[in-house]
Image (tube, rainbow, N blue to C red):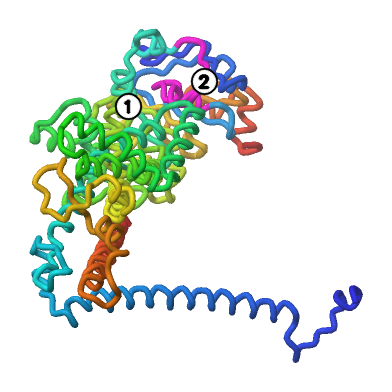
């Protein structure tokens, strides 16, 4: 395994008294697309949201263990949330374009980071929309409200918005589950091209999707990591019986 | 009897009990609606007819009414100029609203975006309490506290536009705050998450996303506040001094359309010019209320 960009050691997360992750250790190699799979309530989304501290926004959450991003403990005192989230971005299940124009959506992260120069913004917006494979569809309508786009287009604008701030890791929380099959496959195409430049960590319920596009798969069950390995091996020769049963659709 | 009720005899040619109830229900609903429609039309017709009498029977010029500041209808039709009151009404409305909006926004953000649930609940109760206090009590407080305070600080009688603004500020604050809270609550929670995930701070998220997304609702809140300020009569009348003069400063006595109506309606005789002139003020208020309504609708449409 190449150098891990994110290294999670013995992560335990509890909401109040209810512990939903019971000590998970997992290392993400830079430049891989890792799929987190498992039945509903297994803790995979909680795990994902711990990686850029989005769980902090929920009250009454208790987190133990360490998560290191490039060797730095992200939960250490004085760790800067703005810097962390600029480096580790997130794309959500529902496309969440702001009720602004497409341009303003994509430029948002840059503007809050203090970039104001028009030419620079123009260039980064175009570049990001191209990377998210939606430039050709929206280049003439950049002033149009992002809410007027279809669900799949909205999601790609959200991906572009995330790319514009040039994160190193992008967390994706079931990015296609709210979309129709055609939009989903377009997003998958986009993710495959992004894999070259970014580390992607994706929660998905869609096992075919995981097997199609991910390099590695992590299988969660009841708050524990059951198995983690290269995707082909996981799907063809799972080490655990329960992994095999889940991946073959016998429960879930 | 009770046996009979439950036997199903299927008398198709006779209206069943349920059918008759349905008919009663529909009839009562329809009758209530028609009754209210008639009432509203009658009110508008009555105010319109009386409000226009000064112009039709007494031949007051509409331009005089709107642009002249000479108000003394007892002396004849040349002296039915409402401009001083119109200007004062707008001035009081705009300044009171301007004063209240920042506080309403701060309260709304505070109550929707952070704070513990319990504090929010207490604040909510306080705001509802403010909204529920009768206007005469606000006027009483104004006369007792604000007017003497202005007299001490700025000199003069203390009665005037400033006193009116301060009293109205407290009165429109709960209106604007509650509606602002509704507007902020209507912003999807995911916007906040998405913004934070892009590396924005809490304040950037609030000011650049949440407030911007809630803008149509907040504008509606402001318009409702303005309408309340424009229409409030009693409390304003108690502190504004009731002199129909074009305002030159904020601390000398003045009169709004509503304060003039409340203070003069007992002093005129039905059918006289003085009485008709007051009805014209009422008509102007009705038209303004219509205008506020229209603006709210336009904002609502733009939102959708």
- The correct choice, above or below, for B163 with respect to A115 in the image is below
Q: Is residue A70 magenta?
A: no
Q: CA distance from mark 2 to mark 1?
A: 19 Å
Q: Is residue B16 visible?
A: yes
Nearer the viewer's eye, disc 2 or disc 1?
A: 1
- Specify the quadrant of the image occupied by residue B204: top left
| Picture coordinates of residue B192, whole percent (x, y) | 36, 34
Specify start and end residues of the magenta stretch as a single range.
A44-66
Which of the two residues, B8 or A116, is positioned nearer the viewer here?
B8
| Picture coordinates of residue B296, whole percent (x, y) | 30, 58
Count of numbered badges drawn on the protein: 2
Which of the two residues, B235 or A225, is positioned nearer the viewer here?
B235
Q: Is residue A161 visible?
A: no
Q: Is residue B51 left or right of residue B44?
A: left
- Specify the quadrant of the image occupied by residue B168: top left
2 and 1 marks in contact (CB < 8 Å): no
The residue located at (27%, 54%) in the rendering is: B230
> In the image, which disc is placed on residue B127?
none
| Picture coordinates of residue B48, whole percent (x, y) | 28, 75
> In the image, which disc is placed on residue B202?
1
- Specify the quadrant of the image occupied by residue A175: top left
Q: Is residue A46 magenta?
A: yes
Which residue does the numbered mark 2 point to in the structure image?
A61
Q: Is residue B279 left or right of residue A115?
A: right
In what quadrant of the picture does the C terminus of chain A appear? top right
SS under mark 1: helix
The residue located at (38%, 48%) in the rendering is: B135
Q: Is residue A205 left or right of residue A123?
A: right
């Amino acid at each position: 395994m190449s150098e891990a960009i994110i290294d999670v050691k013995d992560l335990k997360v509890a909401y109040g008294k209810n512990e939903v992750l019971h000590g998970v250790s997992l290392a993400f190699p830079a430049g891989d697309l890792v799929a987190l799979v498992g039945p509903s309530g297994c803790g995979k989304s909680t795990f994902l949201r711990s990686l850029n501290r989005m769980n902090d926004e929920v009250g009454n959450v208790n987190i133990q263990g360490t998560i290191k991003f490039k060797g730095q403990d992200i939960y250490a005192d004085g760790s800067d949330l703005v810097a962390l989230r600029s480096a580790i971005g997130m794309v959500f299940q529902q496309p969440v374009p702001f009720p602004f124009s497409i341009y303003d959506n994509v430029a948002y992260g840059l503007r809050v980071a203090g970039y104001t120069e028009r030419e620079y913004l123009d260039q980064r917006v175009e570049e990001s929309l191209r990377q998210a494979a939606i430039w050709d569809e929206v280049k003439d309508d950049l002033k149009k409200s992002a809410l007027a786009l279809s669900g799949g287009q909205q999601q790609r604008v959200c991906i572009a918005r995330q790319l514009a701030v040039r994160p190193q890791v992008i967390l994706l929380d079931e990015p296609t589950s709210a979309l129709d099959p055609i939009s989903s496959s377009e997003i998958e195409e986009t993710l495959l091209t992004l894999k070259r430049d970014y580390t992607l960590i994706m929660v998905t319920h869609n096992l075919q999707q995981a097997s199609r596009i991910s390099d590695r798969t992590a299988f969660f069950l009841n708050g524990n990591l059951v198995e983690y390995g290269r995707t082909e091996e996981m799907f063809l020769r799972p080490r655990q019986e329960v992994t095999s049963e889940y991946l073959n659709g016998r429960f879930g | 009897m009770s046996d009979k009720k439950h036997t199903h005899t299927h008398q198709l040619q006779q209206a069943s009990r349920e059918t008759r109830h349905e008919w009663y229900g529909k009839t009562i609903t329809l009758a209530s609606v028609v009754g209210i429609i008639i009432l509203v039309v009658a009110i508008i017709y009555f105010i319109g007819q009386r409000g226009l009498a000064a112009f039709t029977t007494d031949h007051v010029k509409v331009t005089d009414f709107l642009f002249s500041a000479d108000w003394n209808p007892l002396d004849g039709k040349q002296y039915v100029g409402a401009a001083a009151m119109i200007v004062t009404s707008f001035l009081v409305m705009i300044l009171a609203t301007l004063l209240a909006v920042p506080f309403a926004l701060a309260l709304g953000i505070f109550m929707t975006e952070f704070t513990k649930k319990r504090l929010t609940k207490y604040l909510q109760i306080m705001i509802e309490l403010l909204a529920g206090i009768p206007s005469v009590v606000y006027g009483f407080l104004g006369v007792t506290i604000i007017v003497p305070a202005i007299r001490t600080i700025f000199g003069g009688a203390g009665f005037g536009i400033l006193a009116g603004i301060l009293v109205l500020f407290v009165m429109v604050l709960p209106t604007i705050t509650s509606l602002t809270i509704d507007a902020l609550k209507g912003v999807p929670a995911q916007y906040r998450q998405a913004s934070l995930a892009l590396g924005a701070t809490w304040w950037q998220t609030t000011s650049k996303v949440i407030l911007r997304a809630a803008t149509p609702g907040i504008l509606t809140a402001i318009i409702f506040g303005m309408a309340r300020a424009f229409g409030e009569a009693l409390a304003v009348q108690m502190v504004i001094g009731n002199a129909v003069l074009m305002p030159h400063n904020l601390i000398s006595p003045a009169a709004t359309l509503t304060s003039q109506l409340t203070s003069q309606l007992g002093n005129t005789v039905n059918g006289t010019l003085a009485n008709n002139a007051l009805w014209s003020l009422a008509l102007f208020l009705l038209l303004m209320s219509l205008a506020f309504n229209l603006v709210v609708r336009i904002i609502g449409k733009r939102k959708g």
